[in-house]
Amino acid sequence: MAAYGTAHRLPGIDYAAQRTFFATFCVSNRQRSFEDTRLADIAKEVILGYRRREWYWLFAYSIMPDHIHMLVRLRERRRSLSRIIATIKAQIIYHARSNGLSIAFQWGYYDWVLRSNQDPREFAKYVVANPVRAKLVLSSADYPYCGVVDIWY
């Protein structure tokens, strides 16, 4: 078992390589913070903003009430997945505080490294269907906090 403060990551995997990752990170104590549309809007802008800055290709994302899913492909070796997730969390917190709001995230995140035999479209479908499975909307097209951004096929 890893000590507190160390990540549970696969040995031998380069988390800064140009590869595709499915990542999930949660709000502290699974509070439903993103039910506040002001916080959800902030999270969406941060996620899309770092995509516009070309930190990653954003295949799909979903901002759920208590967690965020992202399917990303890294663009540059100088930015690892952990740096990207930490930056996104920090920026959401910063912009929330700047707007008189509060949010905290659980330590760490969950990730899945897509293998060459895994179709990213299946992961993207899972990500954008999350609000439907959670019964937040009838169609993912009706949910303003999820989408497929960069098409890769």
Image (cartoon, helix red, strand yellow):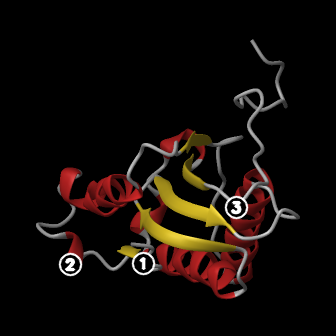
| Disc 2, SS | helix
Q: Is residue 113 above or below residue 5?
A: below
Residue 110 relative to residue 41: left or right: right
Residue 151 tag number: 1
Q: Is residue 40 above or below residue 115?
A: below
The residue that appears at 52% across and 77% down in the rendered structure is 44
Residue 72 tag number: none
Q: Which residue, as the protein is rendered here, is positioned at the far bottom?
A: 52
- Amino acid residing under circle 2: Asp
The disc, 1 or 2, on the residue closer to the chain's N-terminal end is 2
- Please tell me how crowded label 2 is: few (under 14), some (14-19), or many (20+) other residues with Cα within 10 Å: few
Proximity of marks 3 and 2: CB atoms separated by less than 8 Å: no
Q: Quadrant of the C terminus?
A: bottom left
* Cα separation between marks 1 and 2: 20 Å
- Amino acid residing under circle 3: Lys
Q: Which residue, as the protein is rendered here, is positioned at the far right?
A: 78
| Disc 3, SS | helix
The disc, 1 or 3, on the residue closer to the chain's N-terminal end is 3
Residue 11 relative to residue 92: left or right: right
Q: Which residue is mark 3?
A: 89
Specify the quadrant of the image occupied by residue 8: top right
The residue that appears at 29% across and 59% down in the rendered structure is 125
